[in-house]
Amino acid sequence: MLIKVYGSAVFGVEATTITVEVNVNKGIGYHLVGLPDNAIKESNYRIAAALQNNGYKIPGKKITINMAPADLRKEGSAYDLTLALGILSASNQIQSKNIDKYLIMGELSLDGGLQSIRGALPIAIKAQEDGFKGFILPKENAKEAAIVSDLEVYGVENIKEVIDYFDTGKPLEQTKVNTREEFFKCLNFPEFDFSDVKGQESIKRCMEIAATGGHNIILIGPPGAGKTMLAKRLPSILPPMTLHEALETTKIHSVVGKVKNMGLMSQRPFRNPHHTISSAALVGGGSYPQPGEISLSHNGVLFLDELPEFERRVLEVMRQPMEDREVTIARAKFTVTYPSSFMLVASMNPSPSGYFNDPDAPVTSSPMEMQRYLSKISGPLLDRIDIHIEVTPVPFEKLSEERKGESSVEIRKRVMVARDVQTRRFSNLEQVHYNAQMNTKQIREFCVLDKDSKELLKNAMERLNLSARAYDRILKVARTIADLQNVQNISTTHISEAIQYRSLDREGWLG
């Protein structure tokens, strides 16, 4: 007897429906075709044990299973439940009247229990698009799949529950999630707050500008100056994610299996990879491409601590994704594209010892050593960072103050007001939501300078020998500073402040 059951394969952040055709007839043998990987080929051992432990068996006949489309590579253990139900239906051990109306996925334990799968959200979106009545999957993943409306989602813990549902009509409990209610309920505040930061008013100002315009920022200063502390508090002043951003972000994290029991992600991601990371782990890749850290920080913050310690080759692969806000990974047979619209926050010491030009420091570095250390970061990469700012150690008087600094809530209010200005400005542009995303054409339109501002910028460009890209960055930052003041036109004060935030472009910037 021939039976069709349905599963799904995830490529990039999109899913493709897989038709599993199971044919049982006379003879002996188990044939699995349709480009399965080793995890799927091994599934017959898991399925045999799971069925036996639940009072069923793999029939002693010739079983042929085809996973269509046959030219598309399938991977992972998530097809166990799909294959098991196909075998039971095709061998008439259970009724299968409505089995083709459901998309079924899950990894089996030997006792018939179900383990979580990856990519439940993209699969649910595809199931709804393809008109399936419901989606049966492990209970751990039910909440994230239930985000999708107009699709019945059933989270199950054991294969016996699924068998009883189709064979005897015993109902399954449907998982329901009110997406909007869930989203706004989870908008709790991050644990790190700017009120914990003593002093550093100029750096807080930079952080506020960066958060407002979505600008990349690099913090340069000696050890213990507070670079990491400040970076970890940046997400607390970023505007809350919109529902659309939350869905996009959850989709990417779902692909790598990081959304178990969570449902919709409401906090902006903050990723902090170690400097030993490989280029494939940072931008995504592998023989079967997975999202990297830059995609996992989509709509959030990517923090690279001790930037010069990263391999130069690893940093260089970020250049194109930072500009295009997406990364495309090409393989011989297919190409996947992951979104990567993130805010880069980097930190570094000014020299190998960390105490360049500090007379009180026990170890100092020569200018040549410092130059060699700084040259680990290429000019094109620094060009893509809008704000360079020096972080100086906080004096004891400030550290011992009882008075708390301005809280993240207060800073965030100003950021959100300025973001609203940008949202209205770019309302007709689909791909642009805040100042850092403007291209050259939009910069010319929205960053018009008066005569004095042009003269000031011209002098700065000539003295600091800035590139055309740095020129654009200064204009974007100046536009953000004007938005924070709720001013329509960019003035010389905005331009001069934006120029100050290009520390690494200045010769002898520490002296």
Image: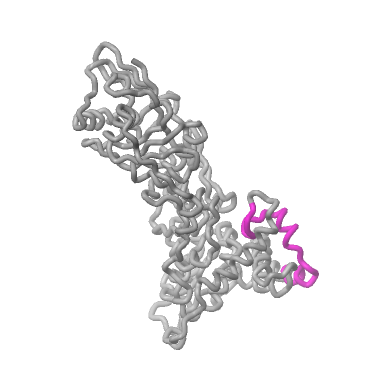
Q: Residue at x 55, y 47 (%)?
A: 326
Q: Which image quadrant is residue 354 in?
A: bottom left
Residue 293 magenta-highlighted: no
Specify the quadrant of the image occupied by residue 43: top left
Residue 492 percent location from the top left of the image: 73, 73
Left or right placement of residue 57 versus residue 425 in this view: left
Residue 299 rendering spot, x and y as whole percentages: 52, 55
- Image: magenta residue range: 432-457
Q: Residue at x 46, y 54 (%)?
A: 182
**Relative to residue 20, is residue 472 drawn left or right?**
right
In which quadrant of the rendered image does the C terminus lie? bottom right
Q: Is residue 325 above or below residue 230?
A: above
- Magenta: main secondary structure equals helix
Q: Tell which of 498 and 230 is nearer to you.
A: 230
Residue closest to the far top: 26
488 vs 348, left or right, is right
Query: Residue 422 versus residue 159: which sits nearer the camera?
Result: 159
| Residue 484 visible in the picture | yes
- Determine if the magenta segment contains residue 442: yes
Between 161 and 295, the one nearer to me in the picture:
161
Q: Can residue 34 be seen by looking at this rendering?
A: no
Drawn side of residue 444 relative to residue 254, left or right = right
Q: Is residue 136 above or below residue 32?
A: below
For the N terminus, the image quarter is top left
* Residue occupying the far right of the picture: 451
Q: Quadrant of residue 31?
A: top left
Residue at image point 22% right, 24% down: 57
Vertical arrangement, residue 23 with respect to residue 202, above or below: above
